[in-house]
Amino acid sequence: MREVVAVDWGTSSLRVARLGADGRAIEEREFARGILTVPPGGFPQAFDEACGDWMKSPDALAVICGMAGSKQGWREAPYAPCPAGFAEIANRLTWIEPNRIAIVPGVVCEIDGSPDGAPDVIRGEETKALGVLRMLRLNDARIVMPGTHCKWVRASDGCIESFATFMTGEFYAVLRQHSIFARTMPPEDGELDRGAFLRGVDHSIRRGNLLQSAFSARTLSLFDRITPEAAPSYLSGLLIGEELRTQDLMPNEPLVLAGADKLTQRYGIALEHLGVPFRSLGQEATWLGLHAIAQSGS
């Protein structure tokens, strides 16, 4: 079995891992070398600086997911259509160096099932989602991956059947920094205020209209019904609550949360408050997904 070097290369960060035979990390490294920091023609050097020592083994195989496969990345890896499982993705690898360095394709789906509609895409999250299936030994699942753009994935028969993107994190940043809210909130978010956060979740669920409910972050501050320090948590709750409100959340259909600890924790708090069962995983699912893709494609 070949030694797999797993690479998760995003917009703002670069994570690499040397994987064992079970797909789990033997050694990990992380760098602030997202694709936007790499100059034209600089990807080979950045890759070598991150994990070139691991690639000295003649049997080493590097598998890369994320924005390194975008038009702004190392080399564009065309999207694979839904449904997409390990085999479908492994068959569409884009090879930087034959049989040595490969980029995983992103996945595309049509939101309304029609080519005339609006497509949705993921890059990197497809690998994490498939890793979740492998980690939990599931064929069917609903997987939520919080982030700047939160992804909700439906998996069926071991494949990504469909997914939807919610720009919740980006909308938070825009409202927090570039709207009237910026004048009444402190420069930094500070620690999560759980009560204010859940108050925001509940308000979104009740009102059912974010364009209207968002203004409550202004009026509650105006009448001193929420402190400036708690206002960012309230706004976060409003936006995550709106995202959850639009989902068909069934008590008998547990969700799997997979993502960075702090943001994933907020989704978990909201789901628990709404009585929706879930399981929570960290970033290690990406390594398992890359390992399985490497085995499927080798």
Image: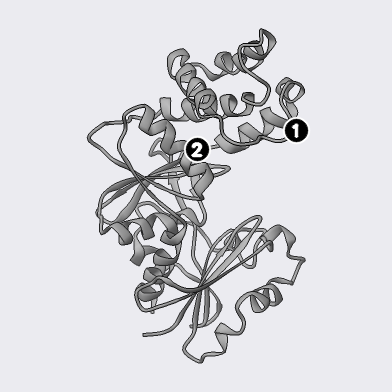
Look at label 2 and name its amino acid: Ala
Residue situated furthest top in the rendering = 223
Tag 1 residue: 187
The relative height of residue 178 versus residue 135 in the rendered view (above or below) is: above
Quarter of image, res 2 = bottom left
Tag 2 residue: 118
Is residue 38 rendered to the left or right of residue 162? right
Mark 2 vs 1: CB contact within 8 A: no
Q: CA distance from mark 2 to mark 1?
A: 37 Å
Q: Which image quarter holds the N terminus? A: bottom left
Residue at x 70% of width, y 22% of height:
181
Q: Which is nearer the eye, 155 or 80? A: 155
Residue situated furthest left in the rendering = 252
Q: Does dot 2 land on a helix, a strand or a loop? A: loop
Q: Which image quarter holds the C terminus? A: bottom left
Q: Does dot 1 land on a helix, a strand or a loop? A: loop
Give the total number of marks visible in the rendering.
2
Can you tell which of label 2 and label 1 is closer to the viewer? 1
Residue at x 63% of width, y 28% of height:
232
The relative height of residue 199 versus residue 285 in the rendered view (above or below) is: above
The relative height of residue 26 versus residue 8 in the rendered view (above or below) is: below
Residue at x 43% of width, y 14% of height:
206
Residue 194 rendering spot, x and y as whole percentages: 50, 29
Residue at x 39% of width, y 69% of height:
293
Look at label 1 and name its amino acid: Pro
Residue 123 rendering spot, x and y as whole percentages: 52, 55
- Look at the image and name its color scheme: one colour
Residue 204 rendering spot, x and y as whole percentages: 48, 19
Q: Which is nearer the eye, 111 or 132? A: 132
Q: Which is nearer the eye, 230 or 24? A: 230
